[in-house]
Image (tube, rainbow, N blue to C red):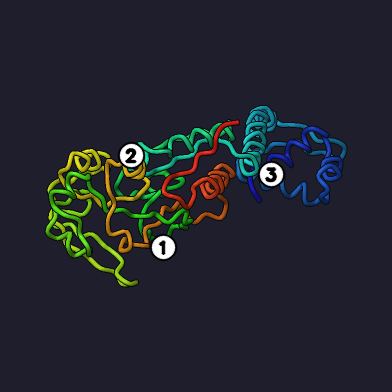
Amino acid sequence: MDSLDLIRTFREVASHGSFSQAAKRLDMSKATVSKYVAELETRFGVRLLNRSTRSVSLTDAGQLLLERSTPVLEMVELTQSELQDRASQPGGRLRISAPHGMGNGEFPNLLADFMRYYPDVSISLQLTNRTVDLAEEGIDVDIRSGPVEDANLIVRKLRLMEMVVCASPIYWKKHGKPEHPRDLATHEALTHSLLGAQPVWRFDDNGQPLDVHVKSRMDCTEGAPLIRVAMRGFGVIYLPSILVQSHIEHGELVPVLQGYTRKDMWLSAAYLQRRHNSAALRALLDFLQTRVGDGPGLKRKQAS
């Protein structure tokens, strides 16, 4: 029997001054109530009640337990109520990790909209390009692009990330546009640092993966600097369209090889397998599923 339940039984006996009345109140037999109080006394190693054939009274130890247990049980009951509310009503703090590049796009606006819809939810956002350990670092959900191979995680695919090979009009005029991904081996590439010193870009060639080794003129841990350098005419970039679409629309970058870009880059929300996820996490996952569209950018609903 849980110690708190034993204490609750003791308090009923102390309140009514009777095992029989406490038994009626708790819908137990008198023998069970007596057994629970005796077990509590055994656990503490002191007598809590003075028993006679006519009455029950508190010992000094019993009086101390009655007084000290009151705020404890009130706090337990308050905590239980808050936890139950949190399970049904989104609230508390969510810890989210996402790639650095998402800090420069519409993702912060989406989080602002989410907090507007759920005013009792607070957010801690960690921007990092490394693979985070959700359990070790206390992360509720990790927004990732590309394959997620951790069997301990549940992965909710949000949107297929369209990839784009592009460069500035000046670059293509000087170097010529590639007709096949293999042609990129002779071009100057601007690559992500995670690809290492010998970067490889993966493409889709008639449904088959095609890896092309490219020569990196510059690498960076984030996409934004690579985009700016590409717009200056110093190389080719291969990035999710969400990062470059506005520059393409303004003619600052020109896409090529659109029939060859890989089709397995998903933007996903990864979270730990838990029996009970908070209402806030469930709300966030549903919100992202609804608001992250299939187009080149993240959809943002206009505030009403």
- Left or right: residue 242 compared with residue 8: left
**SS for callout 2:** loop
Secondary structure category for the residue under label 1? loop
Q: Are marks 3 and 2 in contact (CB under 8 Å)?
A: no
Question: Element under label 3?
Answer: helix
Q: Position of residue 160 (x, y in %)?
A: 42, 56
For the point 49% across and 47% down, the residue is 292
What residue is disc 3 on? 6
Residue type, mark 1 in image: Ala
Residues at marks 1 and 2, CA–CA distance in whole angstroms: 42 Å
Mark 3 against mark 2, which lies toward the viewer? 2
Find residue 280 and report its image quarter.
top right
Q: How far is mark 3 from mark 2, CA to CA?
A: 72 Å
Q: Amino acid type of disc 2? A: His
Horizontal side, residue 137 vs residue 4: left or right: left
C-alpha gap between disc 1 and disc 3 = 42 Å
Above or below, 174 relative to 14: below
Residue 264 or residue 174, whichever sits in front: 174
Query: 10 Å neighbourhood of mark 3: few (<14), some, or many (≥20)?
Result: some
| Residue named by callout 2 | 250
154, 35: nearer the viewer: 154
Q: Residue 234, position in %: x, y?
A: 15, 44
Percent position of residue 174, x then y? 13, 49
The answer to which of 182 and 68 lies nearer the viewer is 182
Q: Can you give x and y, in whole percent of width and height, for residue 291 in the image? A: 52, 45
